[in-house]
Image (tube, grey):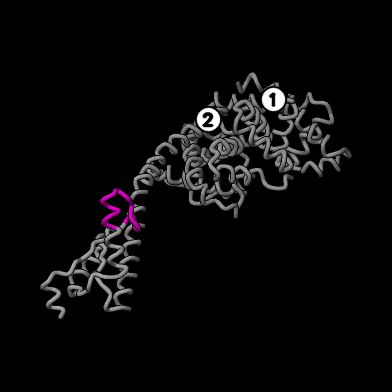
Amino acid sequence: MGERSIDQALVERVQQGEKRAFDILVLKYQNKIIQLAYRYVHDHDEAMDVAQEAFIKAYRSLGKFRGDSAFFTWIYRIAINTAKNHLVASGRRPPRTDLDAQEAEQYDGATGLREYATPEHVLLRDELKETIASAIKELPDDLRTAITLRELEGLSYEEIAQTMECPIGTVRSRIFRARDAIDTRLKTLLD
Amino acid sequence: MKDKIHEQLSALLDDELADAEQSLLVRQLVKESGLREQLSHYQVVSDALHDKLPQQIDTRFHERVHAAVQQEAAINAAPSRYRALLRPLAGLAAAASVAVVAVVSLQTMHQQDPAATPSVATAPTVDSYIRAENAPTPVVPARGLDVYLVNHNEYAVNRGMQGMLPYVRIVGQDMRPEDSREAE
């Protein structure tokens, strides 16, 4: 793990006036925030609007963010409040219980989404997932193990290094090569 | 070289980058849209593996947020213009406080030496107007340092110089013959 959280470093850069650093935070959390917003508003376009509004609100308030909580916990809370306000403003009733950041992290998006997703949208997501699964299957053993331990088991580079009995630098390289191979397969879908 | 940077991006995503590398990479990310796009692709892979993908994947979403933030910044530029307008007022406030100091210090001088003379008053504060209205007409012979100050200030103003206290208008009061008689 980095000596200092990348999120905190990015937040500090934004606080110093580097707007583009905020883009990186948006990049990191946009999918999760859109998915979270969708769970409240049940409409993809509205979810995108809510997510955008949440990020703008976060940007406005970032000067006051002191890092007492993790950035993602903070932005999740903002997104939930924004989604609830959006529902109230459009005459709908917000859910009685909130989804806290940890629950949202553990939330299985597919469960909630299948109820409302339109087939063409699901196709894109499912196509992406299929492509990724197929790309992982075709990876050499060492790359597949490294990316699986990282992404699915959530192990740190150090833990993976111990498990795979190799230096941390090798783990870092294997994870990158795995991601790069997957990305090569995804490029036609994403670009 | 490109691979090395992309490897750093991958480690950044996992929060496994050392501070020194992190700082350099973030600087590059801020500058290069291509790198941000690459990071976005790696993030999609990660989110897909964690089942965190929304229905539609909009890889340009962050650009839209950025545009909105830029717009926000443009709106926020307005108060800064107001701040620019407030700067002269800050100067006035400083002038007013100088005036108060001048009044207080000169009054102190008069209290300490009742024989000292022409009263030197400052114009701009309301407080000084009130005080001038309520106060009895000062009875003071035009002598000493005060005379020098008044004379110097008149000279400085006539020569277009700032004088000793540039924000303070100093006026002198000469004694009229009838005042002189009343004083006696």
* Residue sitting at the far top: A188
Where is residue B131 shown, x and y percent of the image?
23, 70
Judged by its main secondary structure, the magenta piece is loop
Q: Which residues are magenta?
A: B153-167
Q: Amino acid at mark 2?
A: Glu
- On screen, B106 above or below A78? below
Residue receiving disc 1: A183
For residue B5, which numbered disc appears in the image? none
Image quadrant in which you'd find residue B29 = top right
Is A100 magenta? The answer is: no
Element class at badge 1: helix
Q: Amino acid at mark 1?
A: Asp
Image quadrant in which you'd find residue B115 = bottom left
Which chain does tag 2 point to?
Answer: B
- B32, A171: nearer the viewer: B32
Q: Is residue A46 left or right of residue B46?
A: left
- A155, B8: nearer the viewer: B8
Image quadrant in which you'd find residue A2 = top right
Which chain does tag 1 point to?
Answer: A
Query: Which numbered disc, 2 or 1, marks the residue closer to the eye?
Result: 2
Q: Is residue B131 left or right of residue A6?
A: left
Residue receiving disc 2: B63
**Distance of mark 2 from mark 1, alpha carbons?**
20 Å
Are dots 2 and 1 in contact, CB under 8 Å? no
Task: Residue at 44% x, 38% y: name it.
Answer: B73
